[in-house]
Image: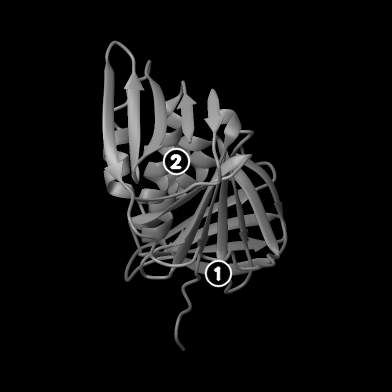
Amino acid sequence: MRLVTSNPSIIRNAVESIGELITEGSFVLEKDAIRFRAMDPAGVSMVILTIFNSVFDVYEVNGESLTLNLEDFMKVLRRAKATDKMELTLKENRLKITFKGNAIRSFSLPLVEPLGESQKVPELEFKCKVELDVEVLKDAIKDASMVSDAVTLELSGNTFFIKAAGDSQEFSMELNKDTPGLISMEGEGKAKYSLDYLGKMMKASSLADSLTLRFSTDYPLQLEYKALDKIDLVFILAPRIESE
C-alpha cells in the first residue's frame, strides 16, 4: 500500500468531520476509492465516507483495511502544512504518515483491532429532498441551537421550514424557490432531529459548497456532502420522536 497526495487538507477535513461522531473505525482501500462507514457509540447516527482515488497522485492498494483511532489520526493530519505532500504506507501493522515539504517528517500509528463486522447501510426511502447552500443550513443550525436542543425540518408545498422551540423562545427560518441559497426541493414531510448531532455534522461544511437533505415524516435524516470526483460524505441521523 502506498498513497501520495499533494492536498492533505482534503483528507484532514474528511477525517475531522467523521471524528466528531466516531472514535475509531476501518478504512477499506478498494480499487476506486477508500471507504469508511460506522455507527456512533450511541447508535443514533451513521457515517458513510468515500474518498475517491483521484484525490491521490499515487494510489497503490491491495484491498487493505486500516482500523485506526481517529483522534490520534486527526492529531497527525493537523500537522500537515499547506505545501506538504503526504505519503501513507503500511509497515508491520502500523500506518506510516510522511509529510514532505521543507523537511521530511514522519509519524507512525498502530492499527487497532476492528470492533466487529462493518456496519450495513440501511435501505431508506425518502419522500423529501432539499438541496441548499451549506452556509444557509449552518446559520440555521446555529440560530436554532440558541433556543432548543432539537430542530424541526418541514417541507410543505413550495416552502422549506426550519424551526425550533424552547421553553420561552422560538426560532423559524422559511425558504422558498426564490430564496437565495435554496437550490431545489421536492416532497412533503416533517420530522425533528437533535441539534447536537446536526451541529457536529456541519463541521464537514468545508468539504462542499452545497449539501442535500433527505427525510420523511418522523423518519431518519440523510445529509450528504459531495465534492465531485473527490469526496462523498453521508450522515444518517435518527429522528427525535416526542412521546405523547
Relative to 155, 34 lies left or right: left
Please name the residue that numbered disc 1 is placed on: 191
Is residue 13 at least partly visible in the picture? yes
Res 89 → quadrant: top left
Distance of label 1 from label 2 (alpha carbons)? 27 Å
Q: Residue at x 27, y 32 (%)?
A: 107
Q: Nearer the viewer, residue 189 or 164?
A: 189
Q: Nearer the viewer, residue 243 or 166?
A: 243
Q: Is residue 16 above or below residue 45?
A: above
Residue 62, percent from left and from top: 55, 42
Please name the residue that numbered disc 2 is placed on: 14
Query: Few, some or many C-alpha atoms within 10 Å of disc 2 (few <14, some 14-19, many ≥20)?
Result: many
Is residue 56 at least partly visible in the picture? no
Query: Few, some or many C-alpha atoms within 10 Å of disc 1 (few <14, some 14-19, many ≥20)?
Result: many
Looking at the rendered structure, the kind of residue marked 1 is Ala
Q: Residue at x 46, y 49 (%)?
A: 140
Q: Is residue 225 above or below residue 127?
A: above
Relative to 33, 98 lies left or right: left
